[in-house]
Image: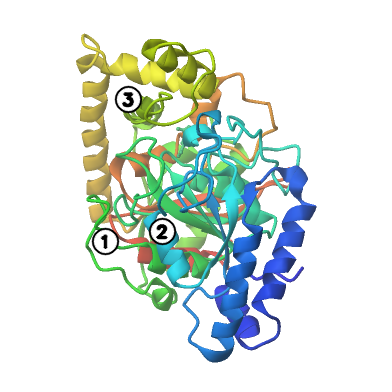
Amino acid sequence: MNTYNRLSDLHKDLLGGKFTCMDWVNQHISAIEASKDLNIFVEIFYQEARNRATVLDQKIKHGKPGKLAGLIVGIKDNICYKGHGLSAGSKMLNNFESLFSATVVERLLEEDAIIIGRLNCDEFAMGSSNETSFYGPVKNPLDTSKVPGGSSGGSAAAVAAGLCQVTLGSDTGGSIRQPASFCGLYGLKPTYGRVSRHGLVAFASSFDQIGPFAKSAEDLAKVMEVIAGSDNYDATASTKEVPEYHSKLKEANKPFRFALLKDTVDNNGIDPEIAEHTRQYAEQLKKEGHIVEEVSFPYFDYLVPIYYLIATAEASSNLARYDGVHFGHRSEKAHDLESIYKHSRAEGFGLEVKRRIMLGTFVLSSGYYDAFYGLAQKARNHITSEMKSLLAKYDFLISPTCPGTAFGIGEKQEDPIQMYLQDIFTVMANISGMPAISIPTGTHSNGLPFGVQLTADYFAEDKLLQMAERSSSLV
Ligand code: GLN
């Protein structure tokens, strides 16, 4: 099947009449059918995608197609699409149907994107490998014995396998950037508030952000222009104007100032090849005329604990609504109100989600609140102000996206601490709310891809996208 890495190339052919939108959709449906063993899709919207293709073919001939005309998009199974299933990878929401569409979905449809299905993910977006999903793990299309990363594993695998040109995921602690790194893709976590969270199943509301995966910075930019912006349904969505990111992609604001976070590359837990590659990337930037300095950011031992204290606290509160009464699976065993709650939650949630609810409830409980949750909030403020002062001096922070490449399915499943350490470099952007991008610059001697992560100041997605565009030719 013909696939495109850039929307502009697709548009040349599709809008130029080389093939119809219906052919395009059918090609994708066949490819999706042929790769069912990867377990990427939870549901394919066959009829709907074909109906939209019919309308769009007419529009291409006689009307004015939208900015994303014919772009085949998949959405993570925690983003609402009216009249379609939504399960957040959980038995708890098996058979649930969305009553409204997320703002991002409305905006994609308005610009004539074709949403082709919903994508497997870790249960309630909790995980780093897609193995906590009720539907089972997704296989990494680049090596099917490996995980695609998580929690947006299906979103990353769909793009890597060429089944969607762009997908949406959500990133609470790294769930866009880590799978992007594992699957050799570009993945952007926008500034907290840049993209509306209306219609995203809440995990940890002060961290959650929706963002795109793609094979080019151009596609990230074009999708961001459509999905970002203020929203009356989300009070945390910023009213700041959304720039035309794609037209700024080649703007040369040289030289930029980069801070290489030396505690990430001089870290015992990191794969030495990834550390070396990140240094080389920084060297290459210097050769290009940028200013690169090594800076110390000695907080990496604290970031994962801060994240897991706050994220589990927020999750325990957000997931209280799934009780078999307000929302979610209701147990057959239930006979009164209390047993509805108990049995429904015991049967509906998987192990990892239960672990998080218990931990979150504990850190919020009286007597422990100040010692855990309160302290984590103070530490969060401290990290944020340290990051702000670094970004007052530098345009970007450089680090690896992850400490390793994609690991084997089942390899880390029994060890939550190992799994949580996947997030060591990604959670800082969620803790501070800053935007960060994973750029696919590396290939390991084991044959697997990995990324470099750049973090920038609030609302500097334009600069991140420019660097992503330029980095394709850097290393
Ligand atoms: N791996 C992290 C976690 O399990 C991040 C998840 C996410 O970003 N949704 O919480």
* Residue depicted at 26% across the width and 61% down the height: 230
The disc, 2 or 1, on the residue closer to the chain's N-terminal end is: 2
**Looking at the figure, which quarter contains the C terminus?**
bottom right
Q: Position of residue 247 (x, y in %)?
A: 41, 78
Q: Do the residues labelled 3 and 2 touch (CB within 8 Å)?
A: no
Query: Which residue is identified by label 1?
Result: 230
**In the image, farthest residue toward the top:** 367
* Residue depicted at 75% across the width and 59% down the height: 31
The CA span between labels 2 and 1 is 11 Å
Provide the secondary structure element on which disc 2 rests.
helix
Provide the secondary structure element on which disc 3 rests.
helix
331 or 240, nearer to the observer:
331
Asked if residue 310 lies left or right of residue 474, the reply is left
Provide the secondary structure element on which disc 1 rests.
loop
* Residue depicted at 72% across the width and 55% down the height: 32
The CA span between labels 3 and 2 is 26 Å
Query: Which residue is identified by label 3?
Result: 313
**In the image, farthest residue toward the bottom:** 62
The quadrant holding residue 366 is top left
Three-letter amino acid code of the residue under disc 1: Ser
Query: Which residue is identified by label 2?
Result: 104
Q: Position of residue 442 (x, y in %)?
A: 62, 53
208 or 302, nearer to the observer:
208
Three-letter amino acid code of the residue under disc 2: Val
**In the image, farthest residue toward the right:** 34
* Residue depicted at 53% across the width and 29% down the height: 269
